[in-house]
């Protein structure tokens, strides 16, 4: 049955490469598309993200439970198909209502993929190997993103929605590859064959909560994730609009080319920094990882506030690229840290709970900061987003002491 399948680690790295290529093709000019082609205002830009995160919040845990009960492999493949469909719809129809619908489809697909792929690779390899793969994956993402950025700029010169359509197509092709080559040898369904779907979902959810109760640090990680989510929505949705409308971009290149160059430069920095982190941080050591995450959060706070206060394009660019690099560095370390505390039977469920906390933070922080941006301007919103990160540093300190 498994002769035609590839080794799990290789499939995971291919998955990372294709999703990075497809997402960078989609995302490089997506904010310009929304700001210029669709003509969305700052509040609508935030609302786009809020609808996406609300969908994630509502469906994250149920789909994570299904991954634990039935199949991580199947869950990931469904996710790829839905994400691809959402990307293609948004790129094809630049109308606000259709763009909101695209976020719902994308968000639903993201919940099927979120948690399931990390749980799958942890089961098929080991926690230690998976932690190394998470960091290696970030390097591969940064490297492959160069291709997606260039492709996005070229396609965007014809129509700004075209990179989004092509990016969505990449997810469809990946789903076909995973269907043929993705192994699932070590998955043990946690469902009771004598119970129906809803009984199994209820039992799996309770099991996930019990894991958190037995390991109180998980609650702290969930709170940190919520804080990061509340801050991140402003940076994700308004950074391009802030650079174009508030800072002003040099006329040497068009905004599309500028953002392509900025994304490429950020990816190169991430690639180099991740290599140093892989050699310096023991991802199996609680104190080492928590110290690294504390440092990242403190620097990220400065970078986001600095981006909001910057008065020149050059200074804003430094703070922007620093924030992008720090956020990219934070994710694999945080996932490796979270993965240390999980049990195989409920791994996807608990990871989905963590993703749900991220969505909750973005839902809580996004619209409020969007309204502030609309009323008082985007710069003050970035300053507030930076200050929101401060409690996370205190929580990192507390977890280190415990």
Image (cartoon, rainbow, N blue to C red):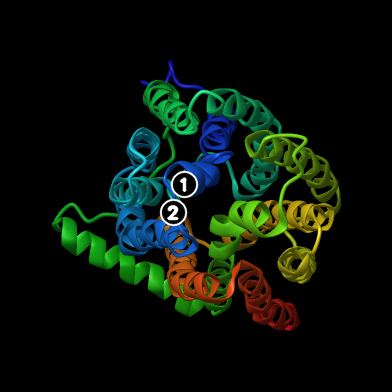
Query: Which residue: 48% across, 28% down?
Result: 159
Q: Tell how many labels.
A: 2
Q: Nearer the viewer, residue 191 or 273?
A: 273
Dot 1, crowdedness within 10 Å: few (<14), some or many (≥20)?
many
Q: Percent from the top left, x then y, of residue 6? A: 51, 22
Q: Quadrant of the N terminus?
A: top left
368 lies left or right of 290: left
206 lies left or right of 44: left
User: On screen, 252 above or below 7?
Assistant: below
Q: Percent from the top left, x then y, of residue 361? A: 49, 71
Q: Nearer the viewer, residue 369 or 12?
A: 369
Q: Percent from the top left, x then y, of residue 92? A: 35, 33
Residue 226 in view: yes
Which residue, given by chain and number where applicable, does mark 1 sit on?
A: 34
Residue 341 in view: no
Query: Which residue: 81% across, 58% down?
Result: 312
Q: Measure the C-alpha gap from mark 2 to mark 1.
A: 6 Å
352 lies left or right of 264: left
User: On screen, 232 above or below 107?
Assistant: below
Which residue, given by chain and number where applicable, does mark 2 sit on?
A: 40
SS class of the residue under badge 2? Answer: loop
Q: Which mark is residue 269?
A: none
Whichever of labels 2 and 1 marks the residue nearer the N terminus, that label is: 1
13 lies left or right of 68: right
SS class of the residue under badge 1? Answer: helix
Query: Which residue: 50% across, 70% down?
Result: 374
Q: Percent from the top left, x then y, of residue 359? A: 44, 64
Q: Quadrant of residue 218?
A: bottom right
Check whether the beta carbons of the residues at disc 2 and disc 1 lie within 8 A of each other. Answer: yes
User: On screen, 138 above or below 60?
Assistant: above
Furthest-top residue in view? 4
Q: Nearer the viewer, residue 317 or 326?
A: 317
């Amino acid at each position: 049955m498994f002769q035609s399948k590839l080794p799990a680690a290789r499939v995971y790295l291919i998955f990372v490469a294709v999703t990075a290529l497809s997402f960078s093709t989609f995302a490089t000019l997506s904010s310009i598309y929304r700001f210029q082609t669709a003509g969305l205002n700052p509040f609508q830009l935030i609302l786009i993200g809020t609808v996406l995160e609300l969908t994630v919040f509502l469906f994250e845990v149920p789909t994570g439970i299904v991954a634990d009960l039935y199949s991580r492999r199947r869950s990931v493949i469904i996710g790829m198909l839905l994400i691809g469909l959402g990307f293609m719809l948004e790129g094809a129809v630049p109308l606000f209502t259709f763009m909101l619908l695209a976020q719902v489809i994308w968000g639903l697909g993201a919940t099927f993929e979120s948690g399931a792929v990390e749980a799958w690779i942890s089961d098929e390899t080991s926690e230690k190997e998976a932690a190394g793969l998470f960091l290696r994956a970030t390097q591969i993402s940064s490297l492959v993103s160069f291709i997606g950025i260039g492709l996005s700029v070229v396609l965007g010169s014809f129509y700004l929605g075209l990179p989004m359509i092509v990016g969505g197509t990449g997810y469809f092709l990946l789903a076909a590859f995973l269907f043929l080559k993705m192994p699932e040898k070590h998955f043990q369904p946690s469902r009771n064959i004598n119970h129906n779907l809803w009984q199994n979902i209820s039992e799996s959810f309770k099991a996930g909560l019990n894991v958190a109760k037995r390991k109180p640090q998980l609650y702290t990680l969930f709170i940190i994730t919520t804080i990061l989510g509340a801050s991140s929505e402003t940076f994700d949705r308004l950074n391009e609009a802030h650079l174009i409308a508030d800072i002003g971009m040099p006329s040497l290149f068009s905004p599309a080319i500028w953002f392509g160059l900025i994304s490429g430069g950020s990816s190169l920095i991430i690639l180099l920094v991740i290599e140093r982190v892989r050699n310096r941080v023991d991802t199996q050591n609680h104190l080492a990882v928590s110290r690294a995450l504390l440092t990242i959060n403190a620097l990220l706070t400065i970078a986001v506030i600095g981006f909001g206060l910057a008065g020149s394009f050059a200074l804003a660019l430094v703070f922007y690229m620093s924030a992008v690099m720090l956020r990219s560095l934070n994710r694999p370390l945080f996932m490796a840290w979270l993965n240390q505390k999980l049990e195989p039977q409920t791994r996807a469920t608990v990871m989905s709970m963590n993703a749900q906390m991220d969505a909750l933070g973005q839902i809580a922080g996004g619209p409020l900061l969007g309204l502030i941006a609309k009323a008082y301007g985007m710069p003050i919103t970035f300053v507030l987003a930076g200050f929101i990160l401060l409690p996370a540093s205190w929580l990192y300190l507390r977890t280190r002491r415990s």
